[in-house]
Amino acid sequence: MSALNNIIIATLSLFAIISCNLKPAETASQEEITDRSINVEGNYVDTAYEKRAEGYDWVGMSVQRLSDTVINIKVRSRADLKGPTCTLDAQAFQTRTNVYRTMLEGKPVLLSFDEESVSIKSELVNDSTILYFYCSGGASLGGRYKKIKENLDPKQVDQTSFIKNLKFNGISFSIRSKNDGDKELLMITPTGLSIDNDIHSHDITGQTVLDAQIGDMNGDGYPEVLVYTQSHGSGSYGNIIGYSVNKGKSLSQIYFSPVADNPKISTGYLGHDSFNLTGTYLTQKFPLYQEGDTNANPTGKRREVLYELTDGENSRILTVHSVKDI
């Protein structure tokens, strides 16, 4: 028993020595590094990018911050030798420090950032196949992408500015934006309408398409499609180009009044909008600026505007339903 007691006493003494030598300041420092928010904006590439001069196919991703908690992601790939391998446009919402979630075909996908890279994976193991949906030839969006300081190779990268396909009750829309010389053209192509499936084109030069959503805003069983754009420059003013399906036959454009033209909601507005369609309502959020604020540092609250779809004399209209400052 005395030998066993000696072992126990020696073990406890060793534990006490180790505990005393721990440095709380260093432990706290490690936690600060883990929890510190980093700048996630920029361009990221897979390992094949470094071998692009040798003809290797590659995939890259560009990240733009839309608000404190929302980022815009664009996955593009090499397109100078053949068709692009992977293409995706989506918005991701922050769930915890440096981790963002986006929904792809109803499946949650996580983007985890550190100072040098981003890792993409499905949140649920059984949903991993969704990462192949936006790629061809058996490729996957999943994996680690290294952050680079320069833009993606302009001679090789797919020049499509935005692309997304949406479906609702047998009616589909292809949303595509591409630079055509000095112009940026948005093309909305419907499929499944009984009378008119013509392409609807818009000159959106000076704007970038951020996202597009589909839903039945007026409850008639037919969809509305909304395309969200943002102007270039520090203001980053939001706009919507939308269409409503007329009883499954054709499309009519939806009227959206810019915030600056609406005195009910324009006070303190300097852009940096985000939009989200949920059920029958569209939500627009933006920061409020007070006198003396710089464009990069609003100090006011955030305004949340809820819109509903109403019938006007000549078109359907996105009408302000409620306004809340939070």
Image (cartoon, grey):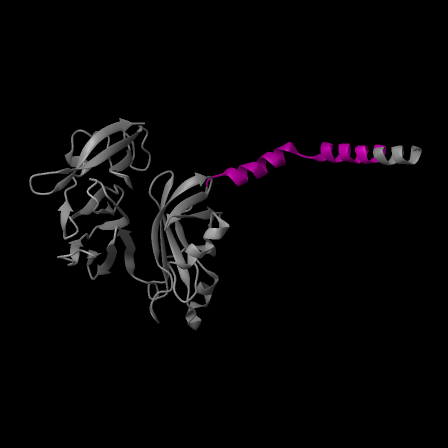
Number of marks in the rendered image: 0
Question: Can residue 231 be spotted in the picture?
Answer: no
Q: Residue furthest right?
A: 2
Q: Residue 289 at what x, y percent from top left?
A: 27, 31
Left or right of 19? Residue 113 is left
**Quadrant location of the C terminus?**
top left
Left or right of 320? Residue 278 is right
Above or below residue 121? Residue 66 is above
Q: Main secondary structure of the magenta part?
A: helix
Q: Residue 71 at what x, y percent from top left?
A: 36, 45
| Residue drawn at x 42%, y 55% as measured from the top left | 130
Tell me if residue 50 is in the magenta stretch.
Answer: no
Which quadrant of the figure has residue 189? Answer: bottom left
| Residue drawn at x 92%, y 33% as measured from the top left | 1
Q: Residue furthest left?
A: 313
Left or right of 195? Residue 163 is right
Q: Residue 118 at what x, y percent from top left?
A: 46, 51
Question: Can residue 54 be spotted in the picture?
Answer: yes
Tell me if residue 18 is in the magenta stretch.
Answer: yes
Which quadrant of the figure has residue 186? Answer: bottom left
Instruction: Please give the range of residues in magenta.
Output: 9-37
Q: Residue 111 at what x, y percent from top left?
A: 44, 48
Above or below residue 272? Residue 60 is below
Which quadrant of the figure has residue 284? Answer: top left
| Residue drawn at x 16%, y 54% as measured from the top left | 203
| Residue drawn at x 79%, y 36% as measured from the top left | 14
